Image (cartoon, rainbow, N blue to C red):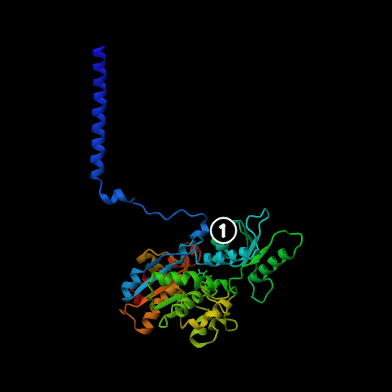
Amino acid sequence: MTSNSNKLSIREAVIITVSLITAGYSFYKLKETPSDEKKESKVNPPKSIDNITDLIGNTPLVKVQSLSKYTGCEVYCKLELQNPGGSAKDRVALKVIKDAIERKLITPHKEKKDLVFEGTSGSTGISIALICNALGLQSFITLPDDTSLEKLKLLESFGALIKKVKPASIVDPEQYVNSCIESCKQINEDVNDERKGIFVDQFENELNWKVHFETTGPEIYEQMDGKIDCFISGVGTGGTIGGVARYLKSEKKLKHLDVVVADPQGSGFFNRIRYGVMYDNLEKEGSRRRHQVDTLVEGVGLNRITHNFHKNEKYINLAYRIKDIEALKMARWLSNNDGLFVGSSSCINACSVIKYIEEFGYKNSGKRIVFVACDSGSRHLSKFWKEALNLKEDELMVTLDDL
Ligand SMILES: Cc1ncc(COP(=O)(O)O)c(C=O)c1O
């Protein structure tokens, strides 16, 4: 009996000893851990969100080191390509669709889905298609039948209903925007069709510039601590430049701010801003090809005044016309020197930074300049970037003076 209880107490003693050693070791390891590691995790991920559309906006602002170093100015780009749909058009599409839902023009998640219509060969269609899927709606996109394959594939991947039409003038009822308006009208007028539709109308719809006034402008102002000398953007609809310029100049009273249109060759905005006339030499009888604007650059440049541009034109004071070859060189420069792989309209914006600094002799002035990086180079692989990669070694810029 006694020896048995002795055996037990030896086992207990062993257990107690092992436990003490383990506890002591754990305490020692805990003390050894650096205090900052104990308090906070090494990762700092953003909070989870309920819907992909919650990621729209609040895009980063990045200093473009190569341009800043060579110009002695502070050059930043607003990375609109970081929106989930890959461009600033996410902001516009979300604003228009939410507004229509609030006004009960369309209702999400119906068995037979309500529709969102737009005539677009560009990024807007992709933004609409993504947002429709995320919010329980159906996108319907009309576009010219020569739209680039990568854009078409993206729209198909998002399950957009697609109607291709032959390229035609804006006065032609078969032109893709006019054809889209008609398709939308037919659904809304058909008493046997329970679906409803809205037409986004990005060129004329004022919600376009307003969303940039409410979001993009304030974001840039905050990110630049209110110190900004120049803002540069291309004009597609005029929504981005109009909304941002109005916010910075009229709301924030940055009277000294220069607002610059970066215009591709063949577009009319350069002459409009510089000389008050909307005309480009490429429009001369017989010299113009069938595209609106004869350039490799996509998404910007027009030969008509849109409502979104007109409403805010008074806030724009400068323009530069950028040749395709300059944009191509800049594409390679930004990719090679900064790891910025961007689309064609971003490149003409970056070229305009250099032209602006040259025109006013701002080299080494420390001026704070922001341009928009609208979309990624991956949207332009088959056209613009194909040409950029064809540049020969001796055509690439060694310094920015080679632009
Ligand atoms: C690639 C790209 N960059 C810039 C713009 C210009 O934006 P906005 O329509 O606001 O003038 C567009 C417009 O379609 C675009 O597609």
Could one spot residue 242 in this view of the protein? yes
State whether residue 32 is above or below residue 182. above
Give the class, few, some or many, for how many residues have Cα within 10 Å of label 1's Cα (few <14, many ≥20).
Answer: few
Q: Quadrant of the N terminus?
A: top left
Check disc 1 and report its element: helix, strand or loop. helix
Any part of residue 328 in sight: no
Q: Is residue 305 left or right of residue 234?
A: right
Horizontal and vertical percent position of residue 208: 55, 71
Please tell me in which quadrant of the rendered image residue 365 appears: bottom left
Residue 209: percent from the left, percent from the top?
53, 73
Which percent across, then down, holds residue 169?
Answer: 64, 75
Q: Quadrant of residue 105?
A: bottom right
Q: Three-letter amino acid code at disc 1?
A: Lys
Q: Residue at x 68, y 75 (%)?
A: 172
Q: Residue at x 38, y 78 (%)?
A: 229
Does 158 appear above or below 27? below
Q: Is residue 178 left or right of residue 272?
A: right
Q: Which residue is mark 1?
A: 153
